[in-house]
Image (spheres, rainbow, N blue to C red):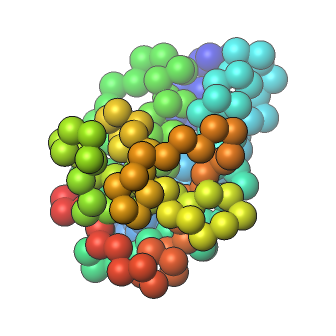
């Protein structure tokens, strides 16, 4: 069954290649989410486990609420297309699944201009505690969690979800420079 995932990855690359000059962030997210749904339908225990571990997180997100579209964002769409989708040599089904997860995460989870207080080497992603408006910032590198005032947070079992774009704007949080 792993060959099906790799074939679907190649099909995704071809689709992106054909449309690369007209793609928007939203259309890429939609392509990746559709790819993810196709993977979910493959009847293989290992693939299902990988789907559950890496892609299921995205299936219930309200993309309209969290997708931050502006003139200034933390990524180059051209680079995402070229270096994250078209160029990677994906040789295993595991890598195809994690690559899609990585691209979705990068495009959907707002990356702020706020530096990690633990080491200062990376900017923090913006989340909220589920069911509240409490901001939680997370470092991609060390996974440090802090609140708006850089106080370390231990959220335990409480889930965090991507902060809505409207809330990010309301709080005047700026995107990380590219």
Q: Quadrant of residue 173?
A: bottom left
Left or right position of 56 against 139: right
Callout count: 0
Q: Position of residue 8 (x, y in %)?
A: 58, 34
Mark yes or no: residue 38 visible.
yes
The one of 53 and 89 positioned closer to us in this rendering: 53
Question: Quick check: 10 above or below 123?
Answer: above
Q: Quadrant of the N terminus?
A: top right
Does residue 99 sit above or below 14 in this rendering? above
**Residue under the image location 53 percent in, 20 percent down:** 94
Q: Residue at x 32, y 35 (%)?
A: 141
Residue 12 picture location, percent across and down: 50, 43
Q: Going 49% across and 56% down the picture, which residue do you hit? A: 136
Residue 126 vs residue 75: left or right?
A: right
Closer to us: 33 or 19 = 33
Q: In the depicted view, which residue is nearer to us: 154 or 169?
A: 154
Furthest toward the bottom, the residue is 170
On screen, residue 141 above or below 166? above
Q: Is residue 37 left or right of residue 8?
A: right
Residue drawn at x 19%, y 59% is: 178
Residue 63, given in percent of the width and then of the height, sits at 60, 66
Is residue 11 among the parts visible in the rendering? no
Q: Could you say where residue 125 lies in the image, as x and y percent from the top left?
A: 40, 54
């Amino acid at each position: 069954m792993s060959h099906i995932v790799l074939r679907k990855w190649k099909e995704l690359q071809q689709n992106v290649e054909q449309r690369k000059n007209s793609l928007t962030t939203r259309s890429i997210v939609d392509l990746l989410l559709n790819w993810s749904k196709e993977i979910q339908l493959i009847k293989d225990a290992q693939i299902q486990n990988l789907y559950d571990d890496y892609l299921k997180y995205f299936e219930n997100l309200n993309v309209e609420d969290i997708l931050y579209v502006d003139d200034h964002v933390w990524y180059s769409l051209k680079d995402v297309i070229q270096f994250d989708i078209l160029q990677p040599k994906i040789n295993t089904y595991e890598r195809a699944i994690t690559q899609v997860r990585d691209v979705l995460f990068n495009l959907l989870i707002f990356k702020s201009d706020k530096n990690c207080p633990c080491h200062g080497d990376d900017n923090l992603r913006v989340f909220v505690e589920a069911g509240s408006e409490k901001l939680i910032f997370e470092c991609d590198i060390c996974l440090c969690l802090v609140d708006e005032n850089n106080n370390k947070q231990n959220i335990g079992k409480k889930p965090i979800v991507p902060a809505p774009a409207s809330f990010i704007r309301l709080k005047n949080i700026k995107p990380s420079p590219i």
